[in-house]
């Protein structure tokens, strides 16, 4: 048996009945069924895999293609050294679009907090440092956003790129 969290609820399901109870539970949500029926059932290896060893078919992704069309994501990509905005558009941005998310990317902290309230989910991709940032305003706006039940995803990958994530966590 497995336990899965969905909108704050913990649901138990098991593999022996092909997740039927689990997916029947989610069908109750009339708004949209967000999950793929095949998610988590890739143990048979009767499918193509990509160069990273993952199933090469989105039906094995947890979320269905197009299912998240009602969700908006704002992405603060404050690290400049690691990857360009064009790279983001081609890779993670394309996957977000495929799943249905409407998303907006900015490299500017002030624009990020000015637009934050118009979004359901915020991603903060941390930089190494920032000398001209109004830290108190930045962190308080993000913490307030999260306290209102909005989604928050903090990226603090590879030293020293965790400046923004640390600011928010300390708040």
Image (cartoon, helix red, strand yellow):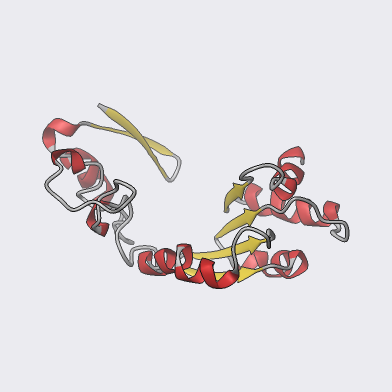
Pick the residue in front: 123 or 85: 85
Image point (20%, 50%), residue name: 37
> What residue sits 72% from the left and 44% below the top?
160
Is 101 above or below relative to 155? Answer: below
Q: Position of residue 164 (x, y in %)?
A: 73, 50
Residue 29, how many percent across, how many down?
31, 54
Residue 128 showing in the rendered view: yes
Q: Position of residue 140 (x, y in %)?
A: 78, 51
Left or right of 35: which side holds 112? right
Quarter location, residue 5: top left
Q: Position of residue 66 (x, y in %)?
A: 33, 67
Viewer-side residue, 76 vs 122: 76
Quadrant placement of the C terminus: top right
Judge whether 14 appears above or below 53 on screen. above
User: Residue, x 76% and y 38% (percent of image)?
Assistant: 170
| Viewer-nearest residue: 117 or 61 | 61
- Quadrant in the rendering for residue 56: bottom left
As drawn, is 66 to the left or to the right of 16?
A: right
């Amino acid at each position: 048996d497995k336990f899965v969290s969905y909108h704050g609820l913990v649901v138990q399901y098991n593999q022996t009945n092909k997740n039927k109870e689990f997916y029947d539970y989610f069908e109750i949500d009339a708004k949209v069924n967000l999950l793929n029926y095949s998610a988590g059932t890739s143990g048979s290896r009767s499918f193509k895999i990509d160069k990273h060893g993952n199933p090469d078919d989105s039906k094995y992704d947890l979320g269905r293609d197009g299912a998240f069309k009602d969700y908006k994501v704002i992405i603060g990509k404050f690290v400049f050294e690691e990857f360009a905005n064009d790279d983001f558009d081609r890779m993670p941005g394309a996957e977000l679009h495929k799943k249905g998310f409407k998303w907006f990317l900015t490299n500017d902290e002030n624009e990020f907090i000015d637009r934050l309230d118009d979004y359901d989910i915020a991603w903060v991709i941390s930089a190494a440092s920032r000398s001209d940032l109004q830290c108190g305003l930045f962190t308080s706006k993000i913490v307030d956003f999260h306290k209102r039940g909005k989604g928050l995803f903090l990226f603090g990958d590879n030293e020293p790129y965790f400046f923004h994530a640390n600011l928010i966590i300390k708040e």
